[in-house]
Image: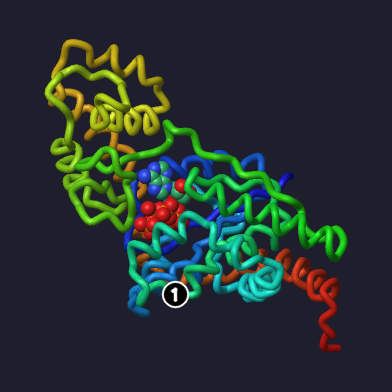
Amino acid sequence: KPRLYSGMQPSADSLQVGNYIGALMQWRDLQEAYDAFFSVVDLHALTQPNDPAELREKTRRTAAQYIAAGIEPSKSTLYVQSHVPAHPELAWILSTITGFGEAGRMTQFKDKSSRYGADTTSVGLFTYPILMAADILLYQTDIVPVGDDQKQHVELTRDLAERFNARYGETFKVPMPVIQQDTARIYDLQNPTAKMSKSAESDAGTLWLLDDPSVSAKKVMRAVTDSEGAVRYDRSEKPGVSNLLVIYAALTGRQIPSIEDEYAGRGYGDFKKGLAEVVVNEFGPVRQRALDLLDDPAELDRVLAANAAKAEAVADATLDDVYDKVGLLRRR
Ligand code: AQP
C-alpha cells in the first residue's frame, strides 16, 4: 500500500469541526487504501506557549478524538510525535541543507511571527517547517493530505528531499501534497469569513467536538446568517449560510443543491434546526467515545506506546540510512 502521513497539533482540549470535516473524515476514508501514519504533533505545539500539564492532557485528548472519529489504531499508525526521537534528529540534519532565506520565505512563519511579536517568536517557530519535513520524509511518504495553508511547507519538504537525494544518493521518497477541497473548509460561525480554528478568540463561533450536544445545538441556532432569508449557497454574498450548508453536506454526505431544495421557501430557523440535529447526531457518539477512552488513560497510553513502536521501526530505518549517507561515524 502507498504511504500517507498527516498530523494535528494538540493545541486545544478539543478539536473543532473544521479539523473533523477538513481532516479526520478524510483520514478515516483514506486509511483503507493507504498505509497511514497519523501523529499528534506535540513537538510542533511547543512553538506556542503551553502549560506543561495541560499540553500532556491535550495530547491524550487529541489522540482519543482521532480514535473516536474512526481512526483505527490497529489499521493505521496513530502515535505521538515526541515518542519517536527520530523526528527532531532528522530535522537537525535537514536544517543543515535548508537555506536561511528559503526558510524565511515561509508565509505561515511571517503571519504567525507578526501576530506574536518579536519576543514570543521563537527559533522553533522559524524551523517548524523543517521539523514538518522530517515528519513526512521519515516514513517514505507518498501522499500528505493538508489544508492549502500547509502547501508551501510540503513544497519545501519536496525540495529538501530532492536536494538530499541529489547530494547523497537516493534516500527519500518525494511526497505529493493532496490539497483539501475548498468545500471542505469550515469557517467561524460568528465570523464566517475567518477559518474555524482551535485558537479562535470567540468560543461562540467554534463548534468543538467535545462540546455538550446542547451547547453545539445552541451555537448552530445562533450562527450568523444574512437578511435575505433564502437557504442558498453563495460564498461571497452569503458566507454564513454557505458555511452552514457546507457543514450540513459534509456531515450527511448529501449534495448542497439537494439541501437547498429541501429548505426552499422555509426560513433559516428551520434550516438551523435541521443542521443542529445533524450536528448532535454526528458528534454525540464521537464525544461519548472520546470521553470513554479518556476514562482509561492507562489503556490509551498503551495503545499509543504500541503504535509508537510501529512508527519507530520505520523512522529509525530511514534515519540510519541518513546518518550513514551524511558521514556520521556510527556507534558500534
Ligand atoms: N476550519 C477548517 N476547515 C477545514 N479544515 C481545517 N483544519 C483546521 N481548521 C480547519 C485542518 O485540520 C488539521 C489541523 O491541523 P493543525 O492542528 O496543525 O492546525 P491548524 O490547521 O492551524 O488548525 P487549527 O484548528 O486552526 O489549529 P490552531 O488554532 O492550533 O492553529 C489540518 O489538516 C487542517 O487543514
For this orientation, the residue located farthest to the bottom is 332
Query: Left of 269 or right of it: where is 90?
Result: right
Task: Residue 125: give x, y in percent of width and height.
Answer: 47, 69
Query: Left of 181 or right of it: where is 185?
Result: left
Tell me which corner region of the image, top left, top right, bottom left or bottom right, holds residue 165.
Answer: bottom right
Identify whether 102 is placed above or below 141. below
Residue closest to the eye, 1 or 327:
327
Q: Residues within 10 Å of mark 1 (few under 14, many from 20)?
A: some
Rendered residue at 30%/27% (across/down): 236
Visible residue check, residue 97: yes
Image quarter of the N terminus: top right
Query: Left of 132 or right of it: where is 3?
Result: right
Visible residue check, residue 20: no
Please, what secondary structure does the residue beneath circle 1 have?
Answer: loop
What residue is pinned by disc 1? 122
Rendered residue at 33%/74% (across/down): 54
Task: Residue 267: give x, y in percent of width and height.
Answer: 13, 19
The three-letter code of the residue at mark 1 reads Ser
Q: How many labels does the image show?
A: 1
Image quarter of the C terminus: bottom right
Tell me which corner region of the image, top left, top right, bottom left or bottom right, holds residue 94.
Answer: bottom right
Rendered residue at 19%/42% (across/down): 190
Identify whether 185 is placed above or below 121. above
Rendered residue at 82%/61% (across/down): 171
Task: Residue 329: give x, y in percent of width and height.
Answer: 84, 85
Residue closest to the eye, 307 or 96:
96
